[in-house]
């Protein structure tokens, strides 16, 4: 499996994006709607068409960054939201980022990467978050595919992976999932454990 830039860009060029809801997912919308500090630094990794970034930006969150391997996906955001700052659309590999964020929103990124990179994902998320920063979003609670994305997972796997690095504030079946994803995804809130000085 070579899930490289060409692979993902071709998916967007050919509109082969079955995971794309065409709108912000209800659980993430509900979470965003209760945020009050519009100055926080937010990252959406593997954001694709990122309706989450559009929604945040239109609600006054100006420090929203999207990172994706697909230039086409990032151009799609820019064409929908012309005023979105180009320098915050990062055409890059998530694993190469060296920035700091208060909040990272997960939406279909974990299930898109090679499962061999899942531990790297956990540690990179930890590195990218500021002290007491949060990783929030949705993870599939279903087996899905073994040979191509989306790759599935389970609540027990996620707890095992995250438990030593993050404080698990919540990980439970999303009550307000998009219809096609009812009972197939977990909503979670993880908080970075502050390093002892």
Image (cartoon, rainbow, N blue to C red):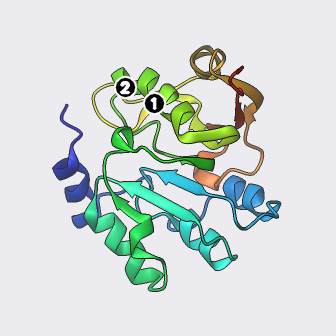
On screen, 177 above or below 190? Answer: below
Quarter of the image with the C terminus in it: top right
| Residue 159 disc label | none
Q: Nearer the viewer, residue 21 or 40?
A: 40
In this rendering, would 99 be left or right of 168?
left
Mark 1 in CB contact with mark 2 (< 8 angstroms): yes
**Residue drawn at point x = 50 percent, y = 61 percent:** 65
Q: In which quarter of the image is residue 38?
A: bottom right
On screen, 128 above or below 16? Answer: above
Q: Is residue 169 visible?
A: yes
On screen, 110 above or below 102? Answer: above
Q: Can residue 187 be seen in this view?
A: no
**Residue drawn at point x = 48 percent, y = 48 percent:** 99
| Residue 117 disc label | 2
Q: Distance between the residues labelled 1 and 2?
A: 6 Å
Helix, strand or loop at mark 1: helix
Quarter of the image with the N terminus in it: top left
Q: Name the residue under label 1.
A: 121
Q: Which of 12 and 40 is in front in this view?
A: 40
**Residue drawn at point x = 27 percent, y = 67 percent:** 72
Horizontal and vertical percent position of residue 25: 62, 58
Q: Nearer the viewer, residue 68 or 180?
A: 68
Crowd around label 1: few <14 · some 14–19 · many ≥20 (10 Å): some
In this rendering, would 9 be left or right of 46?
left
């Amino acid at each position: 499996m070579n899930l490289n830039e060409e692979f993902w860009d071709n998916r967007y060029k050919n509109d082969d994006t079955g995971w794309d809801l065409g709108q912000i997912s209800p659980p993430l919308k509900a979470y965003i709607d209760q945020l009050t500090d519009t100055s926080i630094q937010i990252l959406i990794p593997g954001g694709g068409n990122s309706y989450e970034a559009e929604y945040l930006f239109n609600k006054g969150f100006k420090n929203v960054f999207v990172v994706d391997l697909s230039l086409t996906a990032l151009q799609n955001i820019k064409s929908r939201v012309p005023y979105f700052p180009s320098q915050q659309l990062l055409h890059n590999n998530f694993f190469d980022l060296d920035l700091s964020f208060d909040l990272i929103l997960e939406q279909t990124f974990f299930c898109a990467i090679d499962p061999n990179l899942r531990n790297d994902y956990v540690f990179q998320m930890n590195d990218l978050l500021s002290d007491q920063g949060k990783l929030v979003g949705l993870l599939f609670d279903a087996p899905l595919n073994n040979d191509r994305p989306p790759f599935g997972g389970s609540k027990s796997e996620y707890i095992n992976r995250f438990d030593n690095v993050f404080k698990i504030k919540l990980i439970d079946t999303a009550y307000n999932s998009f219809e096609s994803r009812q009972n197939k995804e977990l909503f979670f809130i993880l908080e970075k454990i502050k390093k002892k000085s």
